[in-house]
Amino acid sequence: MQYKDQIRAWLLAHEEAMRDDLSELVAIPSVKGTPAAGAPFGEKPLEALHLMLEKCQNYGFSTDNADNYAGCVSYGKDAKLGILAHLDVVPAGEGWIHEPFAMTYDAETDKYIGRGTSDDKGPAIAALYAMRAVKELGIPLKHGVQLILGTDEENGSDDLAYYMRHRELPPMVFTPDGDYPVINLEKGMARVEFHAEFSDGKSQILHLSAGEAVNAVPAYAEATVKGVTIDEFLASRQKEYAGTGIGCSVDENDLLTIRVDGRNAHASTPETGRNALTCLLEILCPILNDGKQAEAVRALSKAFPFGETDGTSCGVKIADDISGALTLVLSVMRMDEGKLTADCDTRFPVCASGTNVITQIGASVRPLAYNVLMCDDPHYTDEKSPFVQTLLRVYEDVTGEQGKCLAIGGGTYVHHIEGGVAFGATFPGVDVHMHGAEEFIQREHLLLDAQMMALAITELCG
């Protein structure tokens, strides 16, 4: 590509400035806070937005603040391309060796470490430096480019919804908030809550708790049961459950507590986990007395058997060639004082109807009632489009690797943008510890991100 070497040389000459800008941005703990006047997502996401817009103005770009929900950085007129990145981050959490909000460069591993380095502050800075390189090298463009900076991607993307109501997006949009080479297909997503009440007071299960997040396979589940001895419980065990740890104990009131350890996984890839909740339900079924509670637990266990993740038992096993198979996970459950609630998460292929999938799942779990928590249609952009083919060509030219489109079960920042795709910024086979401790971005990958985004600008807008 015509400007590849020039852009690379410019980025290397400005690498220290790029590192310093990223360090300053990472230092802001831009986790969603309490909304306030002029700060729709709290103080720190707003601080990050203002910092970035100020930097962009100082680098000679025009900026537009959309009421502190999001910002737009523009270069040139008649924008044809939009690059969508976000400045908010998830909480630091536990397990860090380095300070999460003070970026560290580890020379031994050649990594920048800190919360947001890969998701999505590093790619946002790379996008800014891609625009700087094009502008300061004087590369001619026929159309303009915009960098759109959001502040609520991690908590539902209300920032983007507001921006799209009040501003117009360019005709082509990619986000560096996914994986390389290009994500062009995202499955549909639906979440359903089941509920029931037991008024007869004869429940054997006094308490049950499993799961914290509807979009994750629960790694731990626990139930406290009355009227069952350890010997009776052990005698009822019908099989072993590979990959899980099962324990039990009795307290001074002769209440039996059963605990199950499984393995966590994202709801888009539940087959990689071991569902502690569905294991617990299967263990409980043989020791429950007849009654409404037992009927409800057995209905859930029948619809969501341990080890199954494809929806077979709910009658929703569906797959297609372009987006793969439906996944289904029972992820959260609470039972206390005769009340039961349970949540499931399903990711369904392009060939499926979300309404039909939900209806069938609900029918499979009778007598429990259900309500819909969310239902998003699949997102698909034709891989043969000139936009996608250009991005794939850029990736191949810079990395020397094959460019291909990916289909995922999760959702990216462009899920609700027609024709949008994810272009990076995570490289194949690299675990950047996104949302976990010691999140990082490779120094060289940050440079490659900026180089590929700059070339995408020259190819699409030139």
Image (tube, rainbow, N blue to C red):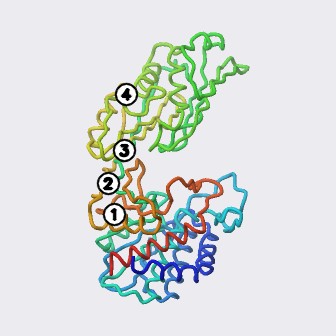
- In this rendering, the label closer to the viewer, 1 or 4: 1
Q: Residues within 10 Å of mark 4 (few under 14, many from 20)?
A: many
Identity, as a three-letter code, of the amino acid under mark 4 = Val
* Inter-mark Cα distance, 4 to 2: 28 Å
Q: Which residue is mark 1?
A: 420
**Labels 4 & 2 near each other (Cβ < 8 A):** no
* Left or right of residue 87: residue 102: right
For marks 3 and 4, the one nearer the N-term is 3
Tell me, yes or no, whether the two marked residues, 2 and 1, touch with CB atoms within 8 Å.
yes
Going from N to C along the chain, the mark reached first, 4 or 2, is 4
Disc 1 marks which amino acid?
Gly
Q: Secondary structure at mark 2?
A: strand
Residue under the image location 59 percent in, 54 percent down: 433
- Tag 3 secondary structure: strand
Q: Amino acid at mark 3?
A: Ala
Q: Amino acid at mark 2?
A: His
- Circles 2 and 3 in contact, beta carbons < 8 Å: no
Residue 184 appears in the picture as rendered: yes
Distance from Cα at disc 3 to Cα at disc 4: 16 Å
